Image (tube, helix red, strand yellow):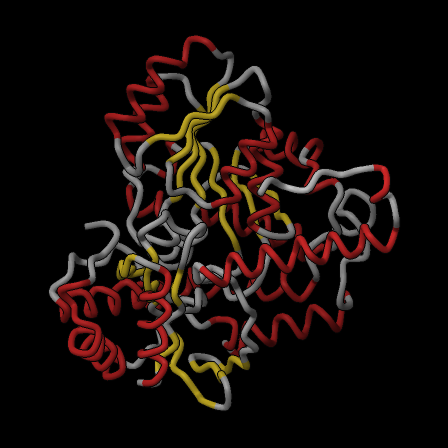
C-alpha cells in the first residue's frame, strides 16, 4: 500500500492539522517500536546527584567535568553579573548586546588558547554552524572525521562546500582524500573533535596539523570535551603540543566550564571576519551576563588549579584499569552494548544500583553501537567509581562490552 498523495479535496485547514498530527503520531510509533523514541526526564540536579522518579542517583552522565556549575565562586560571579547587567543581553551583540563581560571573556579565552582573539557565540552548535559557513563556500572543500559532532556536519552542509568524510582517526584515509582532491579547490578546511564526545578518544592532532600544513589546508578543532580536562585545562591541542599549529580552536563553555555558550579562538583577521559575517553571531542575542560571568570565573579556576583539571581523566583511568579496559584518554568511557533495547536495559540495571548512566542510541551513534557513555568528574567519590566498575563487571558481564576506541 503506497503513501497517500495530496489532492485538491485535501485543501482544508482542519484536514491539514489532522494530517500533521497523524504524521507525528505515526513517526513516534515507529520510533517506539525500535526503541529510539526520546522522552525528556525531569532531573533535579544538585551537584553530583540527580533525582529521578523520587530516587537519588549518582550521575555518571553529566558533562560538568569539574563540577564548576555548583562552585561557590562561579555561582557568585553569575549573581554579580546579574546585579550589574541584568538577566539578558537584550539584543544582538552588533546592536546593543555586547556587554563588557563578553569582551573580557573573549580576551581570557584567547589567552588560554594562545591566539590573538576570540568570538563568543550563544552555543557550541551555533558556533560551528556560523564559523564553517563563514570560512568556506560552494567552491571549497571540507574534510570531516566520520564521528565528529552532528553540528559540524550540519555546518558543512550549510556552507555548500564539497564535503568528504574520512574514517575515524584514520591518517592514511584522510591523507589520501586530501592529496587526491586538494588541487581542485581554492580553499580546504579539515575539522575534527579534540576529544570525541561519544567515544572518549582523542584525535591525532599533531599528525593532522602537519598534514594540513603540507597541503595548505585550514585546520579546525572542536574541543568541547577537551577544554578544562586535558592539557592542564587548556585543551587537546595543548596536551598534544601543537596548539600553535592549529589556526581555529572552537569549543563550548557548557561542559567543564559549568556555564553556557560557544567560542572560536583564532587570529584577529579571522575573528573580525566571523563577527562581521557569521549569521549565527549576527542574528542571535548576545550571551546572558550570568553565563559570561560564570565562564570567566571558571576559566580563572582552570588557570589557578591545574591539579583539579587532571582529576576527571585520572578517575576515568582508575575505572578502566579496575575493569581491565584500555586506558581512558579522556573523562569519557564508552561501553558498547549493541542494540538500543539492550543499552536501555543496561542503563535501567545501573539505575537500580543507584547510578545514572544514560543509554546513547542511534542516530547519535552508529547503528549497532548503542552504548553506555560514562562521564567522570573531579568530585566522583573513588569508592563509588569502584562500585560502579564492580557492578558493571558482575551484573552486566564485562565480556560482552567493549570500548568504542578499542
Q: Name the residue furthest top.
A: 183
The structure residue drawn at horizontal position 53% and vertical position 32%, both measured from the top left corner, is: 156
Relative to 296, 344 lies left or right: left
Count of numbered labels shown in the rendering:
0
Q: If the image is split into quadrants, where does the N terminus sit?
A: top right
Frontmost residue, 405 versus 340: 340
Q: Quadrant of residue 337?
A: bottom left
Q: Is residue 216 visible?
A: yes
Q: Quadrant of residue 88?
A: bottom right
Measured along the vertical axis of the image, is residue 366 above or below residue 299? above
Q: Quadrant of residue 79?
A: bottom right
Q: Position of residue 307 (x, y in %)?
A: 31, 66
Q: Is residue 234 visible?
A: no
Q: Position of residue 212 (x, y in %)?
A: 36, 24
Frontmost residue, 81 versus 344: 344
Measured along the vertical axis of the image, is residue 134 above or below residue 332? above
Relative to 351, 162 lies left or right: right
Frontmost residue, 218 versus 56: 56
The structure residue drawn at horizontal position 63% and vertical position 41%, both measured from the top left corner, is: 3
Q: Name the residue furthest right.
A: 12
Q: Position of residue 275 (x, y in %)?
A: 68, 36
The structure residue drawn at horizontal position 37% and vertical position 42%, both measured from the top left corner, is: 147
The structure residue drawn at horizontal position 31% and vertical position 26%, both measured from the top left corner, is: 174
Relative to 91, 172 lies left or right: left
Measured along the vertical axis of the image, is residue 29 above or below residue 67? above
Frontmost residue, 113 versus 189: 189
Q: Name the residue furthest bottom.
A: 54
Amino acid at each position: 500500500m503506497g503513501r497517500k498523495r495530496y489532492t485538491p479535496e485535501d485543501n482544508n485547514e482542519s484536514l491539514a492539522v489532522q494530517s500533521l498530527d497523524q504524521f507525528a503520531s505515526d513517526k513516534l510509533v515507529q520510533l517506539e517500536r525500535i526503541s529510539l523514541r526520546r522522552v525528556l526526564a525531569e532531573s533535579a540536579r544538585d551537584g553530583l546527584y540527580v533525582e529521578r522518579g523520587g530516587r537519588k542517583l549518582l550521575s555518571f552522565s553529566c558533562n560538568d567535568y569539574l563540577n564548576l556549575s555548583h562552585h561557590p565562586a562561579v555561582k557568585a560571579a553569575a549573581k554579580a553579573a546579574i546585579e550589574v547587567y541584568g538577566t539578558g543581553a537584550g539584543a544582538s551583540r552588533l546592536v546593543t548586546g555586547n556587554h563588557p563581560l563578553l569582551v573580557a571573556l573573549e580576551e581570557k579565552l584567547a589567552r588560554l588558547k594562545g591566539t590573538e582573539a576570540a568570538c563568543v557565540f550563544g552555543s557550541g552548535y551555533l558556533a560551528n554552524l556560523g564559523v564553517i559557513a563563514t570560512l568556506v563556500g560552494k567552491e571549497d572543500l571540507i574534510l570531516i572525521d566520520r564521528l565528529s559532532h552532528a553540528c559540524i556536519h550540519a555546518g558543512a552542509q550549510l556552507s555548500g562546500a564539497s564535503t568528504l568524510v574520512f574514517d575515524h582517526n584514520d591518517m592514511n584515509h584522510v591523507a589520501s582524500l586530501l592529496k587526491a582532491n586538494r588541487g581542485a579547490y581554492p580553499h580546504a578546511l579539515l575539522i575534527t573533535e579534540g576529544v570525541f564526545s561519544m567515544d572518549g578518544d582523542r584525535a591525532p592532532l599533531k599528525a593532522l596539523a602537519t598534514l594540513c600544513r603540507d597541503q595548505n589546508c585550514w585546520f579546525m578543532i572542536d574541543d568541547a570535551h577537551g577544554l578544562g580536562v586535558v592539557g592542564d585545562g587548556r585543551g587537546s591541542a595543548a596536551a598534544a603540543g601543537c596548539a600553535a599549529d592549529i589556526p581555529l580552536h572552537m569549543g563550548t563553555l557548557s561542559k567543564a566550564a559549568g556555564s553556557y555558550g560557544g567560542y572560536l579562538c583564532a587570529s584577529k583577521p579571522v575573528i573580525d571576519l566571523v563577527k562581521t559575517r557569521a549569521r549565527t553571531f549576527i542574528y542571535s542575542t548576545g550571551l546572558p551576563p550570568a553565563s559570561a560571568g560564570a565562564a570567566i570565573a571558571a576559566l580563572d579556576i582552570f588557570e589557578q588549579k591545574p591539579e583539579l583539571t587532571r582529576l576527571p581523566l585520572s578517575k576515568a583511568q582508575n575505572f578502566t584499569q579496575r575493569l581491565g579496559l584500555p586506558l581512558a584518554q579522556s573523562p569519557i568511557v564508552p561501553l558498547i552494548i549493541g542494540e538500543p533495547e539492550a543499552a536501555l536495559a543496561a542503563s535501567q540495571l545501573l539505575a537500580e544500583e543507584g547510578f545514572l548512566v544514560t543509554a546513547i542510541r542511534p542516530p547519535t551513534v552508529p547503528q549497532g553501537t548503542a552504548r553506555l557513555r560514562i562521564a567522570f568528574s573531579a568530585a566522583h567519590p573513588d569508592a563509588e567509581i569502584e562500585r560502579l566498575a564492580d557492578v558493571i563487571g558482575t551484573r552486566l558481564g564485562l565480556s560482552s562490552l567493549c570500548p568504542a576506541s578499542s
